[in-house]
Image (cartoon, helix red, strand yellow):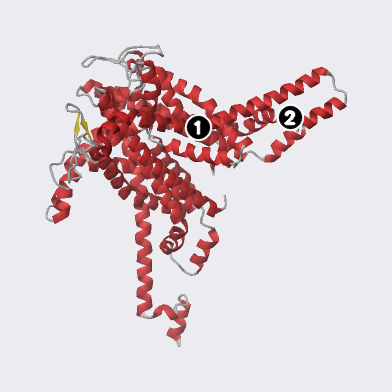
């Protein structure tokens, strides 16, 4: 009697206290422990790569960071130099791509959210846009090569900008549509009841309400294209010298890294690491700033 | 509506300045709408343009080699004989290796984030994983070539060769000298790159499981692992597969990272430790150096094949995720 009470007291498991039942219970607990350990392990495994990659970048690239990197041109092998023309080229082409791509992206997102919310065209555009968002960027490079480089007869910074703009558009379309969809309808109704035409309502009410989200989209787009290499390889090509001529080949940081890293010269490889450090931390900073811009409500 | 307002305005005896402003409003409205509509159509035009230009560019190669283009392994710029089999094989096998590693890890991280992680840690870990997606592809390449490949060559590859040497089929899969670079290395780097995509989609679809379902299962006395394998995963199966397909689409088209570490060898070897090539790596390596129309056209044809494959994979992924969204009620 006393032992019976004890069993009940220790958790009411009298039915489960047969050896067979306890074995099942132990097995279930073991299975649980294994899965949970594996999932913790997976998380550590995933995060380890971020640490390893950033660590290697700092270790290899930081020592090469000097004023010369920002003030001198890319050197011929064997002599000292910097990355000025590559940095400049990247800034110019990223800026150009964003300037061309952003308005198109915002307007397309506006149509999808404000005029054709969930109509057939919007569904199709959204579907195609999502595919463009993940489409291989090298294919975009081939497309621009075919329609711009072949037509013009030579590689140029314009072609590079066009390729980057095509990569900017889907990112901006996506965020603009999502952010405008979050704007409460009461705002639109209030504007309409004041007699405002729709286009003015969109520009002065909806855009303002969704502004931080749209800016986030643009920042994410900048982050995405500033590291892109593949679409520039055969559009803007590369340029060993300072050039501001948009109609001529232009150097860019990613393409220079590609060329220098695969070269047999140690000083070029060193510069490649420094360039890699610059790009990565710029892109990661943009990513973090973009997230900070987003209001907590839109952060899911 | 504006029409009605205008008629109203006229009957109320509005002066011509106000009428003019109304007309300007109406014109501005129509212009803005047309602008947004044409921008939306532009997205479709872009995709159409990509397809048309790739098809146009690959006509010389496809008409010369015909169907043999995708079944031939030869890639000889001197005799101008081109076949896409080796790059297609490399693309498929590296992506397969990538998924083999990234899918279990991605699902594991998603389980950790949704079931185990203390709330204050959720955001930092989530952001860290997303940052992994933000690192440009070329950085994975330079890191893979200078840091990962030498490590792989001296530690992991000799270990794999030794351990599989006595096993009949697997020894040819892991045969040959440890080069460091090669198919397996490329697959591994790809796995790290697609991991964040698979993780974030899997986590999102895990979050769509109604809490009552999980709570009821816990209430029956189930362990966390039973809740995950018997409730969460079956409920979200379609979405998880969609996320995996999305990751596959990324892996298939990834260029720069693979170009650095795959070795660019146009051959199919039984061993996954040997160098190979992928479609995107071939294009990135050879396009600017390609002489002759047939060579260039063959590379564009490779691009067309890549685009068609990724298009199908990504479209399937989107359709699966849309089904999942309908289920979740958004």
Q: Position of residue A265 (x, y in %)?
A: 20, 22
Q: Which mark is residue A252?
A: none
Q: Is residue B225 left or right of residue A117?
A: left
Q: Secondary structure at mark 2?
A: loop
Q: Same chain for the residues at labels 2 and 1, yes or no?
A: no
Graded by Cα atoms within 10 Å as few (under 14), some (14 to 19) or many (20 or more), the crowding at tag 2 reads some
Residue ID at (35%, 34%): B304
Q: Is residue B210 above or below residue B8?
A: below
Q: Which mark is residue A196?
A: 2
- Distance from disc 2 to disc 1, alpha carbons, whole Å, reads 29 Å
State whether residue A23 appears in this view: yes
Q: Position of residue A4 (x, y in %)?
A: 44, 84
The residue that disc 1 covers is B43
Q: Position of residue B280 (x, y in %)?
A: 30, 34
The answer to which of B270 and A45 lies nearer the viewer is B270
Circles 2, 1 touching at the beta carbon (< 8 Å): no
Marks 2 and 1: which is nearer the front?
A: 1
Residue ID at (42%, 20%): A93
């Amino acid at each position: 009697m006393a032992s019976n009470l004890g069993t009940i007291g220790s958790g009411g498991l009298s039915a489960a206290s047969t050896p067979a039942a306890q074995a099942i219970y132990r097995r279930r607990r073991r299975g649980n422990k294994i899965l949970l350990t594996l999932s913790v392990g997976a998380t550590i495994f995933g995060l380890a790569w971020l640490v390893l990659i950033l660590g290697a970048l700092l270790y290899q690239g930081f020592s090469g960071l000097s004023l010369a990197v920002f003030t001198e041109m890319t050197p011929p092998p064997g002599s000292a130099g910097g990355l000025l023309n590559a940095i400049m080229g990247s800034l110019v082409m990223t800026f150009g791509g964003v300037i061309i791509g952003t308005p198109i992206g915002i307007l397309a997102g506006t149509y999808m959210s404000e005029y054709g919310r969930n109509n057939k065209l919007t569904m199709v555009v959204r579907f195609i846009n999502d595919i463009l968002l993940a489409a291989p960027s090298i294919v975009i490079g081939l497309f621009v090569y075919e329609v711009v480089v072949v037509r013009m007869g030579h590689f140029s910074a314009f072609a590079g900008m066009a390729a980057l703009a095509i990569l900017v558009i889907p990112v901006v379309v996506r965020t603009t549509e999502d952010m405008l969809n979050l704007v409460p309808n009461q705002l639109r109704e209030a504007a309409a009841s004041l007699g405002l035409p729709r286009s003015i309502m969109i520009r002065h009410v909806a855009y303002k309400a969704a502004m931080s989200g749209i800016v986030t989209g643009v920042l994410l787009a900048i982050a995405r294209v500033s590291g892109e290499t593949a679409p520039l390889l055969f559009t803007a090509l590369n340029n060993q010298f300072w050039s501001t001529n948009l109609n001529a080949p232009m150097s860019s940081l990613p393409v220079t890294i590609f060329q220098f890293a695969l070269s047999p010269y140690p000083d070029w490889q060193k510069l490649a690491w420094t360039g890699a450090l610059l790009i990565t931390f710029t892109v990661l900073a943009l990513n973090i700033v973009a997230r900070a811009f987003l209001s907590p409500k839109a952060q899911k | 509506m504006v029409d009605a307002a205008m008629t109203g305005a006229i009957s109320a005896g509005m002066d011509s300045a106000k009428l003019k402003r109304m007309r300007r409003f109406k014109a501005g409205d129509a212009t803005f709408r047309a602008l947004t509509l044409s921008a939306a159509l532009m997205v479709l035009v872009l995709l159409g343009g990509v397809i048309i230009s790739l098809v146009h560019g690959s006509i010389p190669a496809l008409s010369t080699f015909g169907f043999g283009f995708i079944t031939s392994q030869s890639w000889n710029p001197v005799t101008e004989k081109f076949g896409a089999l080796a790059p297609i094989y490399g693309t498929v096998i590296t992506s397969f290796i990538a998924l083999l590693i990234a899918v279990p890890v991605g699902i594991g991280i998603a389980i950790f984030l949704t079931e185990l992680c203390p709330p204050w840690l959720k955001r930092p870990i989530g952001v860290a994983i997303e940052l992994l997606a933000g690192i440009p592809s070329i950085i994975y390449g330079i890191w893979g070539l200078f840091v990962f490949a030498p490590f792989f060559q001296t530690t992991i590859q000799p270990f794999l060769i030794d351990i599989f040497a006595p096993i009949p089929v697997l020894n040819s899969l892991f045969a040959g000298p440890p080069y460091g670079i090669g198919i397996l290395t490329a697959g591994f780097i790809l796995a790290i790159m697609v991991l964040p995509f698979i993780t974030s989609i899997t986590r999102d679809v895990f979050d769509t499981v109604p809490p009552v379902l999980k709570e009821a299962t816990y209430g029956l006395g189930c362990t966390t692992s039973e809740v995950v394998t018997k409730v969460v995963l079956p409920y979200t199966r379609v979405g998880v597969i969609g996320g995996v397909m999305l990751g596959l689409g990324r892996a298939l088209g990834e260029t720069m990272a693979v170009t650095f570490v795959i070795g660019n060898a146009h051959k199919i070897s039984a061993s996954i430790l040997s160098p190979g090539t992928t479609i995107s790596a071939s294009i990135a390596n050879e396009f600017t150096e390609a002489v002759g129309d047939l060579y260039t056209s063959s590379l564009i044809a490779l691009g067309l094949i890549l685009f068609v494959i990724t298009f199908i994979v990504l479209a399937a992924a989107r359709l699966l995720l849309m089904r999942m969204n309908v289920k979740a009620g958004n």
